Amino acid sequence: LDSLAVLEAIATISRDLDQWLEARREIVARFPDNGEARFQLGKVYYDQKRWAEAVVQLEFSIELSPPEDQYFIANYLRQANIELELN
């Protein structure tokens, strides 16, 4: 690939990630008491290394999710808290 194609691909991915994040924010705004919606938004923040924002959403997600999902979410929350302390 030439460098222009690579830059265009990066720009497209960035727009897609921004749209993905905005869609998750809208879902949480509509359904603030939905644990899965909170987890998905927290996961986007986590993937973007936005640790403080990830922690907030993941904490809400644990509170709102059924017990069988809480351990899975807690793993993300634990790692986000570690990263937040290190950075």
Image (tube, rainbow, N blue to C red):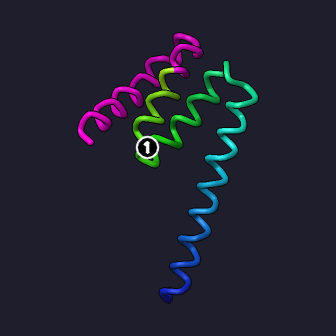
Q: Where is residue 11 in the image (x, y as percent from the top left)?
A: 57, 71
Q: Quadrant of the C terminus?
A: top left
Q: Is 30 left, or right, of 85 in this rendering?
A: right
Give residue 18's position: percent from left, percent from top.
61, 55
Q: In this view, does 32 lie above or below 40?
A: above
**Quadrant of the rendered image containing residue 5:** bottom right
Residue at 32 percent of width and 36 percent of height:
84
Depth check: give the residue in front, 51 or 73.
51
**Amino acid type, residue under disc 1 in the picture:** Arg
Residue at 41% x, 35% y is 52
Q: Quadrant of residue 14?
A: bottom right
Q: Which residues lie in the magenta part?
A: 60-87
Q: What element carries label 1?
A: loop
Q: Main secondary structure of the magenta part?
A: helix
Give the residue at mark 1.
Answer: 50
- The answer to which of 19 and 5 lies nearer the viewer is 19
- Residue 34: image quadrant is top right
